[in-house]
């Protein structure tokens, strides 16, 4: 009984005084909460839930799953007394925290959508939690860099685990936000590669990270006004948010909206039922599209932007090559 009271008192001390003691208290909290198990993150949250980052389906009651970022929200039958919270206010400092150590640093690049995670100033501790000195959750550290708290909160709060899309991918370039890819299958897509996004819904666009959050977190069917600079011209378009199909842990070749998903080696990992009669299977590797050799998702995406055509596909299966003609 005395030991149990001592543990509860210690946990209370951790939560009340964590901000004063650097990150040692956060290390203790990660350890006591079993937030890192079997090399996966299993972070206790409010309402008897845990946030998981894992590539394996957990043996638990799954409340929500995000295939883009490999996040799960599961029911916690034995909730931790002092769960982690997500404080959306700007924090003065952060550190990567495991159940054994911490490493302080700072963001050097924010997360830009699903494909480009946040970069940190220090070598990554994988896996680990990124926290403030008060032990609030600032992100999760993965082998692909850091998923920031804005995406964690969106996943936890949203009714459905999905993202919005207006048919563009962007980057920061010399103080501007530039379109790097334009989805050829996005209906009435007005954007071109090289467009500079100037204004989104009346707000001046200063960072690709902020713009992509506004797009991804937007509900389907919502209309947006977007002002772009193309050469010496300023153009304003009205676009409607639609469902995002690819990105993050999923392939992002633009064929995802057609029903074809690939791994990094261009092997098929998911095929929609409408392709059942074409003879393709999971594991088949895409070699050519319309006679053009391709070696990566990037090359496939770049070809599709120009041609908007995938009628002739050459696949390889166990050393045998075969054509598939898509109608």
Image: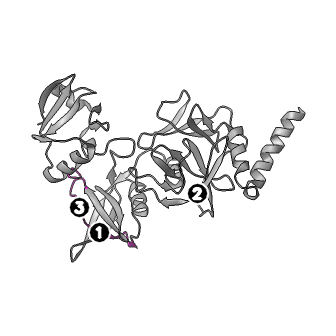
> Residue 281 sits in which quadrant?
top left
Q: Residue 59, relative to residue 255: is it above or below?
A: above
Residue 191 among magenta residues = yes
Residue at 39 percent across and 41 percent down: it is: 249
Q: Are marks 2 and 1 in contact (CB under 8 Å)?
A: no
Magenta span of residues? 182-204
Q: Is residue 215 left or right of residue 309?
A: right
Report the Cα–Cα distance between label 3 and label 2.
34 Å
The residue at which mark 1 appears reads as 196
Residue at 23 percent across and 31 percent down: it is: 285
The residue at which mark 3 appears reads as 193
Q: Residues within 10 Å of mark 3 (few under 14, many from 20)?
A: some
Element type at mark 1: strand
Q: Nearer the viewer, residue 291 or 4?
A: 291
Q: Nearer the viewer, residue 147 or 168?
A: 147
Residue at 32 percent across and 45 percent down: it is: 245
Report the Cα–Cα distance between label 1 and label 3.
9 Å
Q: Quadrant of the C terminus?
A: top left
Report the Cα–Cα distance between label 2 and label 1.
32 Å
Element type at mark 3: loop
Q: Quadrant of the N terminus?
A: top right
Tally the marks.
Answer: 3
- SS assignment for the magenta stretch, majority: loop
Q: Residues within 10 Å of mark 2 (few under 14, many from 20)?
A: some
- Going from the N terminus, do you reach mark 3 or mark 2 first? 2
Where's residue 217, x and y in %?
A: 43, 55
> Residue 182 sits in which quadrant?
bottom left
Where's residue 277, x and y in %?
A: 17, 26
Element type at mark 2: strand
Question: Is residue 21 at all visible to an observer of this figure?
Answer: yes
Q: Is residue 294 left or right of residue 9?
A: left
The residue at which mark 2 appears reads as 105
């Amino acid at each position: 009984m005395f030991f149990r009271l001592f543990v509860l008192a210690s946990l209370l001390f951790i939560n009340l005084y964590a901000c004063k003691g650097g990150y040692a208290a956060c290390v203790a909290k990660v350890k006591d909460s079993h937030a890192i198990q079997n090399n996966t993150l299993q972070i206790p949250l409010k309402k008897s839930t845990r946030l998981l980052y894992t590539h394996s389906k957990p043996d638990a009651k799954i409340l929500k799953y995000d295939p883009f970022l490999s996040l799960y929200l599961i029911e916690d039958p034995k909730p931790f007394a002092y769960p982690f919270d997500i404080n959306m206010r700007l924090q003065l400092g952060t550190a990567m925290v495991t159940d054994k150590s911490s490493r302080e640093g700072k963001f050097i690049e924010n997360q830009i959508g699903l494909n480009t995670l946040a970069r940190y100033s220090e070598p990554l501790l994988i896996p680990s939690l990124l926290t403030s000195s008060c032990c609030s959750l600032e992100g999760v550290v993965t082998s692909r860099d850091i998923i920031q708290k804005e995406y964690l909160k969106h996943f936890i709060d949203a009714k459905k685990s999905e993202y919005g899309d207006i048919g563009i991918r962007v980057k920061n370039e010399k103080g501007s936000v530039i379109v790097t890819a334009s989805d050829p299958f996005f209906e009435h897509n007005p954007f071109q590669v090289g467009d500079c996004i100037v204004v989104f819904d009346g707000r001046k666009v200063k960072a690709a990270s902020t713009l992509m959050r506004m797009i991804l977190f937007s509900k389907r069917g919502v209309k947006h006004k977007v002002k772009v600079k193309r050469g010496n011209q300023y153009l304003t378009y009205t676009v409607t948010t639609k469902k995002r199909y690819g990105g993050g842990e999923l392939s992002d070749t633009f064929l995802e909206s057609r029903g074809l998903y690939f791994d990094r080696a261009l092997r098929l990992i998911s095929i929609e039922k409408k392709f059942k009669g074409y003879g393709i299977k999971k594991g088949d590797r895409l070699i050519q599209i319309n006679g053009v050799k391709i070696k990566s998702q990037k090359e496939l995406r770049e070809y599709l932007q120009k041609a908007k055509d995938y009628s002739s596909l050459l696949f390889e299966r166990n050393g045998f090559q075969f054509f598939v003609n898509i109608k």
